[in-house]
Image: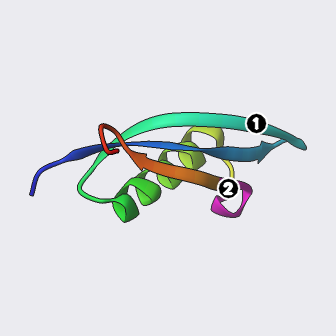
């Protein structure tokens, strides 16, 4: 399996304010990219998955 790069964008709520994010994730498919992002942001900012809203997942280089 080859690894692809996905750009994941969205928002998360932290301490009552909404913050935007855009992150490049290396993954085998879109589902794993979403999972990895939820895990990374949740762990780094100590927030629950329900506070993270993913608005777009796009494979880098895809047309």
Residue 43 vs residue 52, the one in the foreground:
52
Badge 1 marks a residue whose secondary structure is: strand
Q: Is residue 49 magenta?
A: yes
Badge 2 marks a residue whose secondary structure is: strand
Judged left or right of residue 31, residue 3 is: left
Dot 1 or dot 2, earlier in sequence: 1
Determine crowd level at label 1: few under 14, some 14-19, many 20+ residues with C-alpha closer than 10 A. Answer: few
Q: Residue 53: which numbered mark, if any?
A: 2
Residue under the point 46% across and 57% down: 34
33 shown above or below 25 = below
Q: Image quarter for residue 22?
A: top right
Question: Which residue is at the far right?
Answer: 16
Q: Is residue 23 magenta?
A: no
- In the rendered structure, which segment of residues is drawn in magenta? 48-53
- The residue beneath circle 1 is 19
Question: Which residue is at the far front?
Answer: 63
Coordinates of residue 59 in the picture (x, y in percent)? 35, 46
Residue under the point 11% across and 51% down: 2
Distance Cα–Cα, label 1 vs label 2 = 10 Å
Q: Which image quarter is the N terminus in?
A: bottom left
Q: Image quarter for residue 29?
A: bottom left
């Amino acid at each position: 399996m080859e690894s692809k790069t996905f750009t994941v964008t969205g928002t998360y709520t932290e301490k009552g304010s909404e913050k935007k994010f855009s992150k490049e994730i290396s993954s085998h498919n879109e589902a794993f990219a979403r999972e990895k992002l939820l895990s990374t942001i949740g762990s780094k900012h100590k927030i629950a998955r329900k506070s993270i809203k993913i608005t777009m997942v796009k494979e880098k280089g895809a047309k």
